[in-house]
Image (spheres, rainbow, N blue to C red):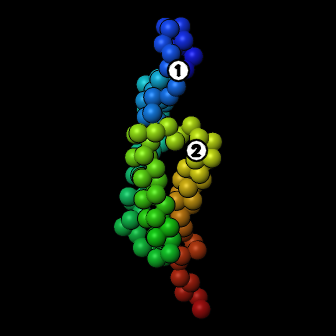
Amino acid sequence: SKIVPCYQVSWGGYAHNGYLQIAAETGIIGLLAFLSILLMFFWTVFKNFTLKENSFVFFVIFGGSAGLLAFWFHSLVDTTFFSVQLGVLMWMMMGLVMTACRLNGANNPLTKQSSSI
């Protein structure tokens, strides 16, 4: 947006692709860093699909990750990452799903049954 006016182009908006816009503003390293966060997120979610300690927590993980996947696919045709409200919603949903993954884990003391009763 700042460089385009130097080349006498009348349009100076966004690329209408969130990933291309990230690459244009932060470079390949910034795009790869952002994509690595997304890949690690889905790797953690995928590992938690096999654990079904608590059905409510499982469906929070499933629904939250499905909504985030739709949001990220929509970002291929729009710049939803650059909307303050939608960006905050994305990071909050990622935090909620990661918290649910921690609650769903096999090492979680809240889901273990006590044998001393």
Q: Tell me where residue 97 appears, x and y as whole percent.
A: 52, 59
| Residue lying farthest to the front in this orientation | 10
Residue 35 in view: no
Look at the numbered disc 1 and give the secondary structure of its residue.
loop
- Residue at 46% of width from left, 76% of height from top? 55
| Mark with earlier residue (2, 1) | 1
Q: Which of the image's four quarters has the N terminus?
A: top right
Q: Which of the image's four quarters has the C terminus?
A: bottom right
- Cα separation between marks 2 and 1: 22 Å
Residue situated in front as seen by the camera: 61 or 51 = 61
Look at the numbered disc 2 and give the secondary structure of its residue.
helix
Q: Tell me where residue 59 appears, x and y as whole percent.
A: 46, 70
Image quarter of residue 62: bottom left
The number of discs equals 2
Per the image, the residue denoted by label 2 is 87
Image quarter of residue 50: bottom left
* Tags 2 and 1 touching, CB below 8 Å: no
Residue type, label 1: Gly
Q: Tell me where residue 60 appears, x and y as whole percent.
A: 50, 67
Q: Is residue 45 above or below residue 109?
A: above
Mark 2 packing: few (<14 Cα in 10 Å), some, or many (20+)?
few
- Residue at 54% of width from left, 12% of height from top? 5
Q: Tell me where residue 83 appears, x and y as whole percent.
A: 59, 41
Residue type, label 2: Gly
- Residue at 53% of width from left, 82% of height from top? 113
Per the image, the residue denoted by label 1 is 12
